[in-house]
């Protein structure tokens, strides 16, 4: 990865429901030491750990979020 001291800081957008959006390119070190990278201009990182392609978001959070569930009839 390029020396980030010469560049402006990376922008990370944290959202209450959904992924963290990170300006790319990025390199991520997983818990087991595996490194994954993306050259995209922006990546969505999974924060709910439901993604089948973790650490990248596949929108699995949408199926489980309270806002996505229909309201119960009373």
Image (cartoon, rainbow, N blue to C red):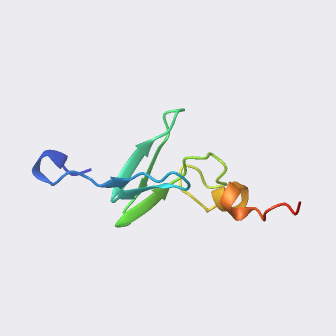
Q: Is residue 24 left or right of residue 34?
A: left
- Closer to us: 23 or 1: 23
Whether residue 60 is visible: no
Total numbered labels: 0
- Closer to us: 64 or 8: 64
Q: State the image coordinates of residue 20 (x, y, percent, origin top left).
A: 45, 53
Q: Is residue 1 left or right of residue 69?
A: left
Q: State the image coordinates of residue 48 (x, y, percent, origin top left).
A: 61, 47
Q: Check the image and report above or below for 36 versus 25.
A: above
Q: State the image coordinates of residue 63 (x, y, percent, origin top left).
A: 72, 60
> Which quadrant is home to the C terminus?
bottom right
- Residue at 72%, 55% (x, y): give it: 64
Q: Is residue 43 left or right of residue 50?
A: left
- Residue at 14%, 54% (x, y): give it: 7
Q: Is residue 9 left or right of residue 51?
A: left
- Closer to us: 53 or 69: 69
Whether residue 15 is visible: yes
Q: Residue furthest right?
A: 74
Q: Residue furthest top?
A: 32
């Amino acid at each position: 990865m390029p020396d980030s001291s010469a560049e402006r800081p990376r922008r990370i957008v944290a959202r209450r429901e959904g992924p963290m959006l990170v300006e790319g390119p990025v390199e991520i070190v997983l818990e087991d030491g595996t490194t994954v990278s993306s050259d995209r201009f922006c990546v969505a990182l999974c924060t709910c750990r439901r993604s089948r392609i973790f650490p990248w978001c596949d929108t699995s959070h949408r199926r489980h979020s309270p806002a996505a569930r229909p309201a119960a009839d009373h």
